[in-house]
Amino acid sequence: MRLLRFGLAAAACCGALVLAGCPDKPAAVPDSGVVEAPQVPAEPPPTRFSLSYRAPATRPAGGLDSNAGSPNAAPLDSGIAADPGTAQVALSEVSLAPDEESVIEPTTLLELRTTRPLKNYRVRLFDEADRAMISDDTVEETDAGLVYRIQLPQPLKTGFKYTLVVDAQTGTAFTDALGRDVDEFRQTLQIAGEKEKPAPPPKPSGKKKRR
């Protein structure tokens, strides 16, 4: 009798389990591979400056010569081929060092380039007395930057120092095309050669004027 009751109880439990069914399996997640995090756009590099100048095409055996067409002048060994039909060589790049002087040949043309256009800026060349040099300046602006040319009426004097400065036209700051502040650019240029001595004052005439 006891066995019969135990069998009925076991059958009732099995029936309940069948009716309840198995728990639902979690839905399978499709294998979509590795999920990549969204990439943050890289910050554009800062605006940079480069400077070049037009050096004399010729040099005499004993030093510099402003007369490039002189028959006694020797070709300037600058490593840059001369332009056909002109007395000047191609532009020579200036090694920029803000805390040092860059030595260049006497020149009448400086060319400043930037990697982006600038806003609210000015470019000036100063002599040793901090006087702005007189020049005929031209500028070309493109999406790739600007080209600023300083054309001087006379070559820079040998042995003297000049300073090229790019700063704000108004206020205290200037920016690039992206609206970012640009640090002031300042480069000292040392002109190769001995410093020219000032001309002595004229000697007074020994003859007395007749009254």
Image: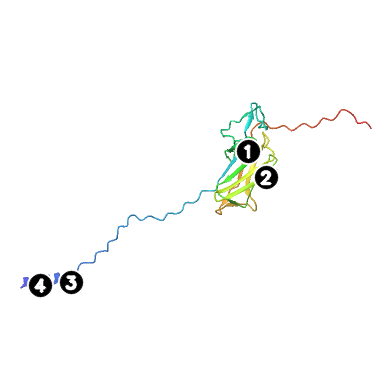
Q: Nearer the viewer, mark 3 or mark 4?
A: 3
Q: Is residue 48 left or right of residue 107?
A: left
Instruction: Residue 176: give x, y in percent of width and height.
Output: 57, 51
Asked if the residues shown at circle 3 and circle 2 are in contact, with their CB atoms under 8 angstroms apart, the answer is no
C-alpha span from label 4 to label 2? 114 Å
Marks 2 and 1, how far apart in space?
Answer: 19 Å
Q: Nearer the viewer's eye, disc 3 or disc 2?
A: 2
Marks 4/1: CA distance?
109 Å
Compute the Cα span from label 3 to label 4.
17 Å
Mark closest to the chain's N terminus, 4 or 2? 4
Depicted 185 relative to depicted 88: above or below: below
Q: Mark 2 = which residue?
A: 136
- Residue 169 in percent (x, y) is at 65, 51
Please name the residue that numbered disc 1 is placed on.
189
- Total labels: the figure holds 4
Judging by the rendered image, the residue that carries numbered circle 4 is 8
Label 3, residues with CA under 10 Å away: few <14, some 14-19, many ≥20 = few
- The image quadrant of residue 204 is top right
Q: What amino acid is labelled 2 in the image?
A: Asp
Q: Earlier in the sequence, mark 3 or mark 4?
A: 4
For label 1, the crowd category at 10 Å Cα-Cα, with few meaning under 14, some 14 to 19 and many 20 or more, is: many
Report the mark closest to the observer, 3 or 1.
Answer: 1
Circle 4 crowding by C-alpha within 10 Å: few under 14, some 14–19, many from 20: few
List the residue tagged with mark 3. 19
Quadrant assignment, res 95: top right
